[in-house]
Image (tube, helix red, strand yellow):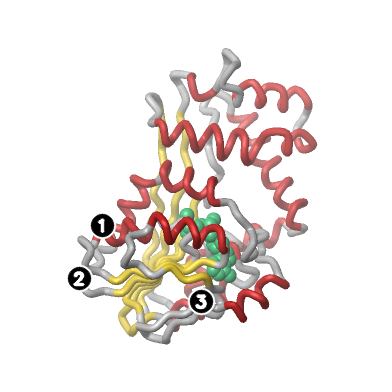
Amino acid sequence: MQYRDEPAAMTGAQAVAGLLGDTPQRDYTEKLRLFNAFARPELREAIDALAVGAGERVLDAGCGTGEAVGWFHESARNRALVVGMDLAAAHVRIARRSAPTQAPILQADMLRPPLADGSFDVVWAVNSINHLHDPVAGVRVLSKLLRPGGRLVVGQSSLLPDMYFAWDARLEQRVNDAVRAYYRERYGRSEHEFTAVRALVGWLQASGLPQVAVRTRMIERTQPLAEADERYLRDAIFRGTWGERLRPYLHPGDFDTLARLCDPDDARYALRRPDFHFLQSLTMAVATKA
Ligand SMILES: C[S@@+](CC[C@H](N)C(=O)[O-])C[C@H]1O[C@@H](n2cnc3c(N)ncnc32)[C@H](O)[C@@H]1O
């Protein structure tokens, strides 16, 4: 199989950022690494459930920092050909370092992949299709890369509201609303567009893939938290996603309570509570090409 990076497509993609702000220059490698270390058990289980066989060809579309590329290799006992593809130069750089050396990692726009039609048995796109302005167009392009009988796996975390504070459902709801308001404002999107982001099954059907099987796993964590869990929740969520940016969207009293729950130096730090119970959904829709 021949591959090439796509500098021409990169120039075009620079002009229009994706729905959630992705460009070839954008870099959120740290958040991706934290998430993959945290959700590794559930992601590995989803990959193993696909039972990729020897000699099969797998594409990870929007591979980020490349963890899933390595997991597909392990799952198929190094007998599958796994290719990673991502728009962002920084993500591709890290993926090339972390994925097995035999795995090609391409920098390309998944809407214009430098790959031949019909050349993959499995295309895996997790938390990436929802970054496109037109996810159905993305699904159509990716399904063309499949051979007949091949499988397209579209996955997304958090189709259900994340649950952080088992002891305070009201604050949890306020925080989830504040995050949505922040994203609406930051990306200038309407609530309708974010609602449409949730329709994995509908996107696959609209792309001419009627045979869809869907399964939602819960990423569920209680005490004792593993180090990867604590690092993701503290660094990627409490500091990276929440923090000061939520202040304008919360009542001052709620912001103060949240700040204390998120502060490892405060006696009320959420991740030390014995009743800490975290839930996040991870939905995978698998379509088989006729
Ligand atoms: C939320 S991350 C998910 C990464 C990875 N799949 C994972 O689960 O960790 C979304 C990824 O999609 C990539 N991406 C966004 N738009 C893209 C496009 N048009 N073509 C290729 N990759 C894209 C981003 O650069 C980013 O790495």
Looking at the image, is mark 1 or mark 2 earlier in the sequence? 2
Question: Is the residue marked 2 within 8 Å of ligand 1, measured from its CB?
Answer: no
Tell me, for residue 111, which label it has, or none.
none
C-alpha separation, residue under disc 3 versus residue under disc 1:
25 Å
**Local secondary structure at mark 1:** helix
Residue 202, image x and y in percent?
52, 69
Looking at the image, is mark 3 or mark 1 earlier in the sequence? 3
Q: Is residue 216 left or right of residue 76?
A: right
Q: Is residue 246 left or right of residue 215?
A: right
Reply above or below: 168 against 6: above
Q: Residue furthest top?
A: 267
Q: Who's the residue at 37% across and 61% down the image?
A: 69
Q: Who's the residue at 47% across and 34% down the image?
A: 278
C-alpha separation, residue under disc 2 versus residue under disc 3:
26 Å
Q: Who's the residue at 45% across and 60% down the image?
A: 155
Tell me, for residue 74, which label it has, or none.
1
Looking at the image, is mark 2 or mark 3 earlier in the sequence? 3
Numbered disc in front, either 2 or 3:
3
Q: Quadrant of the N terminus?
A: bottom left
Q: Residues within 10 Å of mark 1 (few under 14, many from 20)?
A: some
Q: Who's the residue at 68% across and 47% down the image?
A: 180
Q: Is residue 197 visible?
A: yes
Residue 166, image x and y in percent?
51, 27
Q: Residue furthest bottom?
A: 117
Q: Check disc 3 and give the amino acid type.
A: Asp
**Local secondary structure at mark 2:** loop
Provide the residue designation for mark 2: 54
C-alpha separation, residue under disc 1 versus residue under disc 2:
11 Å
Q: Quadrant of the C terminus?
A: bottom left
Reply above or below: 167 against 62: above
Reply above or below: 97 against 281: below
